[in-house]
Each structure stands twice: as structure tokens, then as C-alpha cells.
Image (spheres, rainbow, N blue to C red):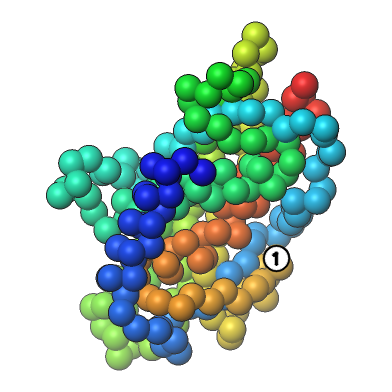
Amino acid sequence: MTTKKTLLAASICAFSLALSGCAYDHKDYPRESWFVQPTTVIEADQFKKVEEPLKVSLVVNYLWEGRPIVTEPFEKRPADWREQYGLWFATERYLEQTGLFKIVEADAEDRQGEVVVDLSREMDPKTKAAIEAKKADPENHPEKIVYEYDMTMKMTIQLKDKPELEATPTTDHMFIGHEDSKEKELGQDPKRFTFSYFNNMDFHTEFVRRFYKQMVFESVKQLENKLP
């Protein structure tokens, strides 16, 4: 990782810790996540083995509730600007875990191409309605809310002197709920997630991570046999 990226990662972590301050383990907050059936969970060791990974630069474009995350100027950044950078680092990690790619700088002399990931995430209308109903009349809505998010991704790979490759993962919906959530009974591969500190980045990073990894892996899986 370059010095610039190292400093950026350090600043993200420092800023996150400054906003958090204490461990969080509220019993009413969701701590379970699961996929929609019949998702086939993909692991990093399921990709074909290659002698040399492709050296590519990486671009991650992220929309939250239909709007791009503001990153400049600094004073206008919302709290979730850190999530876009977190997703870039996560994409780098997951692509390299497949063994098929090595992420390099855009101006690297040995760069062989570019990977672009376009990601959009929105809270499902059912969840928005449940939140508003509970906020308006908490006494008659004592149940714990199951959070659902719609996610879409498009991955394109442009290698030098090769046709552009494009993939869209089948995973496009995520559930976050509780141990006793009825929806979890119909879910796939439920798992508990944890986080040490409660703030926007830490919470979102933890429950988004396994869905995002699955989406990256599904996209690469579609394209691996088309790579040189």
C-alpha cells in the first residue's frame, strides 16, 4: 500500500474512533445477517489458480439512497463518506483474495488494465415504513425491526487490447435482524456479526461486509474463465 493510502486508512480509523467512544451491545439492535435463498455462498479458495495475478487499477463508485457520497470539499462530507473509502479497501482485499488480481496504482508501468465497480445501496421501502410506524407510535410497535437493503453492483474489467468484460451478481438484497426474527427462518446462511464500537462506519461496515464480499466473488466467478 502506498504512503498516501496508508495515511488515508489511518485517518479513517482515527475519525471513526473519535465518533464512537464506547462499546455498544444494545439488545434491541440487530446483530444477525442472512442471505435470500437459494444463495450459494462463495469462498476465496473456489477460484481457479493462476501463476501470475493480473495487475489492475481499481475504481469504486458508490451511491447511497441514489446520491453519490460527497468526498470534497472536506467540510461538506457527511458521516458516511468513510464508507466509500472502506468499500474501496474491501474491494481491493476481496479481489486479491481470489488470487486472480493484484491492485496497483493507475499510473503503474506494469498495469494491465482496470476494474470498475459501481455499487448502489438503498433501504428497502418496507424497512422505511416500519421505522416511521415505530417512531410515530412506539407503544403499538414493540417488535424489533428487521432491516432490509436493496443492493446492486456492476463490475467491469477492461484489460489492454481485450474486449471489456461485465458482470452483475445475483445477490442484490440483504437482511439484518435478530436471533428471534421470523424472517431469518427463511434466510440462507444466517450469521451473527459483532463490532467493538458503535458508529455509522463501524456498524455499516460489519453487516455490509459479507454481502459485499459475496457480490464481488459472484461477479469475478462469472468472469474468471474469460480472463487471460
Q: Is residue 75 above or below residue 26?
A: above
- State the quadrant of the C terminus: top right
Residue at horizontal 40%, vertical 84%? 23
Which residue appears at 47% of the width and 41% of the height?
Answer: 2
Q: Can the viewer see residue 186? A: yes
The picture places residue 193, in percent across and down from the top left corner, at 57, 74
Image spot of residue 16 (x, y percent): 34, 65
Camera-side residue: 185 or 228?
228
Left or right: 52 in relation to 127: right
Left or right of 138? Residue 183 is right
Q: Residues within 10 Å of mark 1 (few under 14, many from 20)?
A: some
Up/down of 114 relative to 67, above or below:
above
61 or 123: which is nearer to us?
61
Residue furthest front as drawn: 3
Q: Residue furthest left?
A: 75
Q: Residue at x 43, y 63 (%)?
A: 204
Q: In the image, what residue type sits under mark 1?
A: Gln
- Can the viewer see residue 131 in this picture? no
Q: Residue at x 60, y 48 (%)?
A: 93
Residue labelled with disc 1: 188
- Up the image or down, 164 lies above or below 130; here it is above
- Number of marks: 1
Figure quadrant of residue 133: bottom left
The location of residue 41, given as percent across then percent down, is 74, 56
Q: As rendered, which of 138 and 34 lies closer to the eye?
A: 34
Q: Secondary structure at mark 1?
A: strand
Residue 66 horizontal/vertical position (percent): 34, 43
